[in-house]
Image: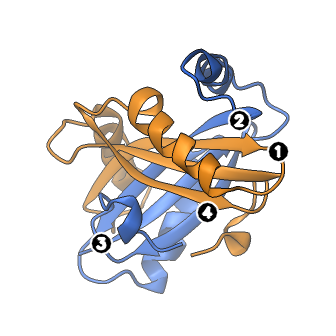
Chain colours: A orange, B blue
Amino acid sequence: MGSIVVDVMLKPEILDPQGQAVRGALPRLGFSRFTDVRQGKRFVLTVDGDVTEEHLAQAREAAQTLLSNPVIEDVVSVRAQQDSGFVRAEGEAQ
Amino acid sequence: MGSIVVDVMLKPEILDPQGQAVRGALPRLGFSRFTDVRQGKRFVLTVDGDVTEEHLAQAREAAQTLLSNPVIEDVVSVRAQQDSGFVRAEGEAQ
């Protein structure tokens, strides 16, 4: 079983109130090192078997038409992931 | 300027109504190749200068305490990214 990860973020010029709320909360919790926060979405699409180029092409099209709003969002990346998408940091490809 | 990307997903055993809604919409739009969809969150934390190990340590702690709810969510990854976080697929490290 393979999966495809689609990352979507608001365009840089679009106001991000969720990110701003996180940004405001960070220093109150002692995390003072961050100058900005943006919040986006991450989708994990599961496919039967290994991820093929056809799966990726469908995922790229779905990312533009269903998973993002092209007026205000950018599809940051569409990429294959060989595991289930619930791996920990050390297991994730950089 | 560097940035740190934090990926958060609902734990596999937690129901994901947003992901299910996307899963239901995909075949109606002609995308028939996906067997499951999960939706999560992606945070981009900006730092002044290059990302250091101290930044990453703060980001890992913030990921567990502010950016995710450990009861229902997993922090999938916390990783440095050398650009602003708004790159396109071809620019993103795998």
Check disc 1 and give the amino acid type: Asp
State how far apart marks 3 and 2 are (Cα).
Answer: 31 Å
To which chain does the residue with label 2 belong?
B
Check disc 3 and give the amino acid type: Asp
Quadrant position of residue A87: bottom right
Mark 3 Cα-neighbour bin, 10 Å: few <14, some 14–19, many ≥20: some
Q: Are marks 4 and 3 on the same chain?
A: yes
Residue B80: image location, x then y, percent: 45, 74
Q: Which residue is mark 2?
A: B34
Q: Are marks 1 and 4 in contact (CB under 8 Å)?
A: no
Q: Is residue A76 above or below residue B57?
A: above
Specify which label sits upstream in the sequence, 2 or 4. 2
Check disc 4 and give the amino acid type: Ser
State how far apart marks 1 and 2 are (Cα).
Answer: 8 Å
Q: Is residue A45 above or below residue B54?
A: above
Q: Which residue is mark 1?
A: A48
Give the quadrant of the C terminus of chain A: bottom right
State how far apart marks 1 and 3 are (Cα).
Answer: 33 Å
Q: Which residue is mark 4?
A: B77
Q: Element under label 1? A: loop
Check disc 2 and give the amino acid type: Phe
Mark 2 Cα-neighbour bin, 10 Å: few <14, some 14–19, many ≥20: some
Q: Element under label 3? A: loop
